[in-house]
Structures are given as C-alpha cells and as structure tokens.
Image (spheres, rainbow, N blue to C red):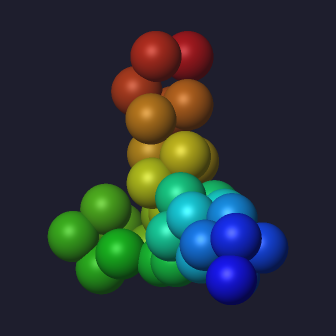
Amino acid sequence: MEQAIVDYIDYYNNKRIKVKLKGLSLVQYRTKSFG
C-alpha cells in the first residue's frame, strides 16, 4: 500500500501531463518557471 502511494505521487508530480501547462508535467512547469 505504501509503495502504491509513493508511485502515485511520483506519477502525479513527474509524469502526468497537464493541457493547461502546455503539455508539461507539474515538475517540468515549475522548473521552467524558475529557470
């Protein structure tokens, strides 16, 4: 169960692509904004 939660958080932050963020994942968008 704990591993499933860790995997989901990783997916949510790093792999899930948002149309509102122009096709970037949340982490990619945040990295781009600060960089």
Instruction: Work out whether residue 19 can be spotted.
Output: yes
Q: Which sits in the foreground, 2 or 31?
A: 2
The location of residue 5, given as percent across then percent down, is 61, 72
Q: Does the rendering let one see residue 15?
A: no
Q: Which residue is drawn at 55% across and 16% down?
A: 35
What residue is shown at x 40% (from left), y 27% (from top)?
A: 33
Identity of the residue furthest to the top in this view: 34
Q: Where is residue 26 in the image (x, y as percent from the top left)?
A: 45, 54
> What is the x, y in percent for residue 16?
52, 77
**View extreme (right): residue:** 3
Dividing the picture into quadrants, the one containing residue 3 is: bottom right
Q: Residue furthest front?
A: 1
Say left or right for 22 vs 23.
Answer: left
Q: Where is residue 25 in the image (x, y as percent from the top left)?
A: 51, 63
**Residue at 50% in and 70% down:** 12
23 relative to 2 in the view: left or right = left
Q: Is residue 2 or residue 27 the one in the foreground?
A: 2
In the depicted structure, whether residue 24 falls above or below residue 32: below
- Quadrant in which residue 29 is drawn: top left
Residue 11, picture quadrant: bottom right
Q: Which residue is drawn at 30% across and 79% down?
A: 19
Return the residue nearer the eye: 15 or 9: 9
